[in-house]
Image (cartoon, rainbow, N blue to C red):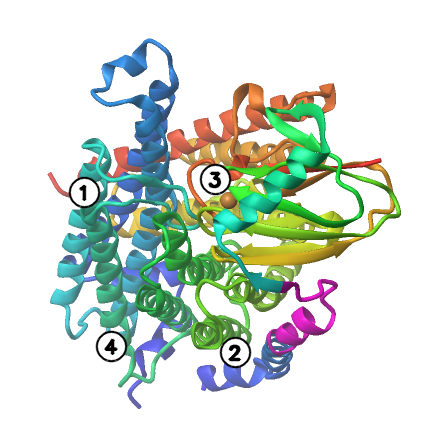
Amino acid sequence: MRVLRESVSDSWWGVIILVTATLTLVSVMPAWRWVWSPEPRPVTYKITAASFLTQLDSMIATYWTGDLIEDIPLVHPPPGDIYLAAQRFRFFPVLELEMGRTYRLHLATTDSVHGFTFPLAQADLLLVPGSAAVVTLTPGVSGRYALQCSEYCGLEHSRMKGWVFVK
Amino acid sequence: MQHSPAAQRSAKAFSDSTAEVLSHALARELHGWVGLAVAALAVAGLLALVAVIVRTPVLRELFPWPWQDFFPKVVITHVDFSLIIWFLSILGALALLATARSTNGHPRWNILGRISLVLSFISSLLLLISVAFNLGEASLNNYVPVLTHPLFYAGLGGLAVGIAGVVLRLLRNLVPNDTVGPFEHGVAATGTTFLISLVCFCLAWTALPAWIEPALANERLFWGGGHVLQFVNTMLMLVIWWVLTEQATAWVIPHRLFVGALWSLAAVALSGVLFYGAFDIISLEHRVSFTQLFKFGLPIAPLIISFIIAIRLAIVRPLLADISALSLSLSLLLFAVGGILGYFLGVSDTRIPAHYHAVISGVNLAVMGMTFTLLLPLLQRPCPTPQAVRLSLLLYGGGQLVLSVGMFAAGIAGVPRKTAGLEQNLDTAVKYFYMVVYGAGGFIAIIGGIYFVYLTIRCLLSRRIGSR
Ligand SMILES: [Cu+2]
């Protein structure tokens, strides 16, 4: 009898609310990600590490400012196509961009898989060998913006950061 | 009319009714699981000490191998002992108690428990041997960092099988049994979620392509199952909250709500298995889907349960001198702080460790409290004095609170994660101040943790009360 009374006084409402709330949240999860996500799906194309490095090197050779930031060249390319490589455990080179101009940022890894998180371009990408991604950005405010690797890639992954300067 | 065991028990305190069904053999097995849990913490502490020595200029020359290589391996093993083995052996202990309660102390497949315990011990030793002989390469991937050596993986696999064994014994004994109370349901749901994490590890293992490098392979191998293991830890804490609430306020969380909460978490974790079919394992979607499962699937149940417990505590106002009430309150506080911080994370600064330090110490405080109020009394060992227990709980909980809040503030001020010394760009005095604060908090928490381990080991090694 005692058990019976206890189970009657134990209302079903609480559990119904709890289970419904949990399941609703979980089921809207995919929608949340893909409908309200600010990130556009990036355009990708096939490359080889060597071909990408050739384009990167020619950009650096032409537009190097002469400055080094932590031993990495600071490059000031004109608006349009610009290149950035992810390699264990750095991003190469450091880019200097102009406010209000539009750039097509080509990104690729030249060794293993890396991640690319760059809040300024609202980008969170996976960089897989053999493929480059293109992100369009028009920086609005001057400053120093951090970008970093978001995929565990080795013991020094947590130090794999880079910078973009906007003038 | 024949009363069912559950009906007879309902009038009695949880720990008393558990003590009644704990046969001599089961009590000895319980001693083993609690021993493994505390030994894991003690080993983790020693490894932390080794890590410090390995970083100290003259002392590090004492090791036969290059310290740069050895240091991350020591850190990795420390993490696995202090998070994985510690929590899983507590799960083993709770699975044993639930088994005993649902079978009146006479479980089927009883030998499985002893085998599981021995296997878990040997597997933990394999991890220690791997680090002692500097085997493999270090991989600091998320959730279950590893040394890339067969012996280390064998240890992890053996541990998984060992815990699965004691969970399966529980499930075997629950199936034909209709006298399953909320505690048994809760542990069964937690154990089932542990089995789900193993399914995720296996699916990941089979899905990994041959071409990826070890760093990413380990990251993806442990990513999904690692998330599910955090569900297991949370559920473990909810079950312990149920026990502590009963002890502190002589009241139980409404049966259906509690059981619904635990099984709904298991259902959410199970939906994670689908991600292995939906997305390529290397893809960004695979990574993001599990973090989303976390954000959307985990919080409701702990939120509602902790709210109910907080209201109950506010009504009953148990003395905080009471160990159950103190550990329950501290656990609620730290878990709530950590949960809130979790929604304000940066990409990769000290806000992330701030969040998980708070959440994990919330789980730890619940386990520490239950060790003193349930596990050690069940083993009939002379327990430490309430003053000593309170001191260890307050040092650990207070230290962790300062540590997490300080770390979070430092994260906002912009200290990068997982680096030490000069690289931290301490360009402002503010950051430096927060780092000193969280350093001090961490130090206090470590003292509290060491004190807990000391008290528990002393208790476990002492003779049973009444034996000569
Ligand atoms: Cu990387």
- Residue B42 versus residue A88: which sits nearer the camera? A88
Residue B103's label in the rendered image is none
The stretch drawn in magenta includes residue B257: no
Callout 2: SS:
helix
Q: Is ligand 1 closer than 8 angstroms to the Cβ of mark 3?
A: yes
Q: Are marks 2 and 1 on the same chain?
A: yes
In the picture, which quadrant includes the C terminus of chain B? top left
In the picture, which quadrant includes the N terminus of chain B? bottom left
- Mark whose residue sits in front, 1 or 4: 1
Residue type, mark 2 in image:
Arg
Give the answer, above or below, for where B396 lies relative to B238.
above
CA neighbours of label 4 inside 10 A, class few (<14), some (14 to 19), many (20+): some
Residue type, mark 1 in image:
Leu
Residue A22, image x, y percentages:
60, 74
- The earlier-in-sequence mark between 2 and 4 is 4
Residue B227 shown left or right of residue B349 in the figure: left
Q: Chain of mark 4?
A: B
Callout 4: SS:
helix
Q: Chain of mark 2?
A: B
| Residue hosting label 3 | A88
Q: Find the magenta span and give its range.
A: A26-43
Residue that appears at 19% across and 72% down: B107
